[in-house]
C-alpha cells in the first residue's frame, strides 16, 4: 500500500525500423533485412541510452514505470533484451525494479543458413522493488493489422497492454502500460475503445501510461477524455507544450515536436502535482536517449 503515487512512461525506441523486412520479396530476403535492422539497432547504442534512461528514472524513483518498444533482438547467437538491459541499469543506479507484467505484441523473425534474425516488440510495466502489487497481467488487442506481404505471408501486427493492481491508501488502482497502433488511425481508435471497455469492466480507478500515437486533437485522446480520463500533463502544466515525439534521428539535430505520450487517470481521487519531461538532453555520444521523451508524474 502507498499514499500518493509517482508513475512514469517511456518509449525506449527499438533502435531500427522493420518496414524493409516486411517488404522483402522472400523469406531469405527478409532475413537479410532483419540482419541489417539488427546492425542499425546496435548502432543506436541502446546500452548507453538505457543507462541514461535508468539514471533519470532513479532520480525520480517512481513506483511504477510503463515502457514501450521493449524490444528483444536476436541475430544468430547475439541477443539484446531491452527489458533486462534496462533493469540491470536501474539496479546499477540504485533503483531496482521488477517486471510486474509484459505483453508480447509483434514477433518478426526469419531463418537463413541455420541462423535466426528477428525482433519481438513488447510493452511492459515495471514496479519498484519495495512496492507490493496485487493481480497483474497482459492482454493483446483484438483489433490488429493483417496484410499480405511480398514474401507470400500474411503479416499480423498486434498491440497490447500490461497491467498491475496496487493500492493507494485504502483504494485499489489499476495501472496500465500500452502502445497504440501507429499507422492506421481506425485500428488505433478501436484499440483505445477496447482498453476503455476492459477498464470499465474492471470497475476500479485507473492510470494509463503509454505512447498513444495521437495528439490531443485526435480522436483517441478525445475518446479517453469523454470516458472520464484526465490528462496529468495539462492538469499540472496547463497549456505548456509537453512535446514527447518524435525525433527523426536519435543522433541527428531534430527534437520532439508533438505530444504523443501520456499519463491519464480516472476515478483516482488523485491530482497530478508535478509532471516532468524526461530525456530532453543529449548523451555524451551526441545521441538522444530515445526518439521519444518520457514523462514522470507525481500524484497526491
Image: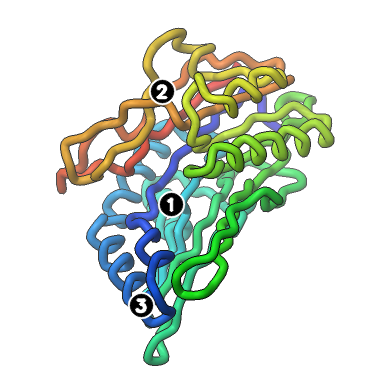
Residue 31 in view here: yes
In depth, the one of 50 and 179 nearer the eye is 179
For disc 1, the neighbor class at 10 Å (few under 14, some 14 to 19, many from 20) is some
State how far apart marks 2 and 1 are (Cα).
22 Å
Earlier-in-chain disc, 2 versus 1: 1
Q: Is mark 1 on a helix, strand or loop?
A: helix
Q: The C terminus is located in which quarter?
A: top right
Drawn side of residue 295 relative to residue 291, left or right: right
For disc 3, the neighbor class at 10 Å (few under 14, some 14 to 19, many from 20) is some
- Image coordinates for residue 8, horizontal then vertical, percent: 50, 34
State how far apart marks 3 and 2 are (Cα).
43 Å
Q: The N terminus is located in which quarter?
A: top right
Residue under label 3, please give it: 29
- Image coordinates for residue 197, horizontal then vertical, percent: 77, 35
Q: Are marks 1 and 3 in contact (CB under 8 Å)?
A: no
Earlier-in-chain disc, 1 versus 3: 3
In this rendering, the count of numbered labels is 3
Q: Nearer the viewer, mark 1 or mark 3?
A: 3
Is 288 located above or below residue 75 in the figure? above
Residue drawn at x 60%, y 38% is 186
Residue 177 in view here: no
State how far apart marks 1 and 3 are (Cα).
39 Å
Instruction: State the residue lying farthest toward the bottom.
Output: 113
Residue drawn at x 43%, y 65% is 22
Marking on residue 276: 2
Q: What element carries label 2?
A: strand
Is 7 located above or below residue 225 in the figure? below
Marking on residue 91: 1
Residue drawn at x 46%, y 74% is 151
Residue drawn at x 66%, y 21% is 229
Q: Do the residues labelled 2 and 1 touch (CB within 8 Å)?
A: no
Is 284 located above or below residue 148 in the figure? above
Amino acid at each position: 500500500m502507498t499514499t500518493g503515487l509517482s508513475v512514469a512512461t517511456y518509449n525506449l525506441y527499438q533502435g531500427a525500423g522493420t518496414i524493409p523486412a516486411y517488404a522483402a520479396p522472400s523469406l531469405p530476403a527478409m532475413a537479410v533485412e532483419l540482419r541489417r535492422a539488427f546492425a542499425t539497432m546496435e548502432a543506436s547504442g541502446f546500452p548507453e541510452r538505457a543507462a541514461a534512461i535508468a539514471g533519470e528514472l532513479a532520480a525520480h524513483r517512481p513506483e511504477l514505470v510503463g515502457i514501450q518498444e521493449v524490444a528483444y533482438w536476436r541475430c544468430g547467437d547475439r541477443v539484446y533484451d531491452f527489458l533486462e538491459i534496462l533493469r540491470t541499469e536501474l539496479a546499477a543506479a540504485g533503483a531496482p525494479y521488477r517486471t510486474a507484467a509484459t505483453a508480447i505484441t509483434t514477433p518478426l523473425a526469419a531463418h537463413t543458413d541455420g541462423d535466426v534474425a528477428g525482433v519481438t516488440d513488447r510493452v511492459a510495466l515495471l514496479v519498484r522493488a519495495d512496492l507490493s502489487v496485487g493481480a497483474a497481467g497482459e492482454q493483446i488487442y483484438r483489433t490488429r493489422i493483417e496484410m499480405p506481404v511480398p514474401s507470400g505471408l500474411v503479416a499480423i501486427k498486434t498491440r497490447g497492454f500490461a497491467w498491475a493492481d496496487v493500492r493507494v491508501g485504502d483504494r485499489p488502482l489499476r495501472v496500465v502500460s500500452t502502445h497504440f497502433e501507429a499507422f492506421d488511425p481506425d485500428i488505433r481508435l478501436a484499440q483505445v475503445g477496447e482498453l476503455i471497455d476492459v477498464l470499465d469492466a474492471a470497475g476500479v480507478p485507473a492510470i494509463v501510461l503509454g505512447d498513444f500515437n495521437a495528439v490531443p486533437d485526435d480522436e483517441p485522446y478525445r475518446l479517453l477524455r469523454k470516458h472520464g480520463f484526465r490528462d496529468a500533463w495539462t492538469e499540472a502544466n496547463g497549456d505548456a507544450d509537453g512535446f514527447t515525439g518524435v525525433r527523426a534521428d536519435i543522433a541527428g539535430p531534430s527534437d520532439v515536436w508533438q505530444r504523443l505520450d501520456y499519463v491519464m487517470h480516472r476515478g483516482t481521487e488523485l491530482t497530478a502535482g508535478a509532471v516532468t519531461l524526461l530525456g530532453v538532453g543529449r548523451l555524451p555520444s551526441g545521441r538522444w536517449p530515445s526518439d521519444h521523451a518520457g514523462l514522470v508524474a507525481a500524484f497526491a
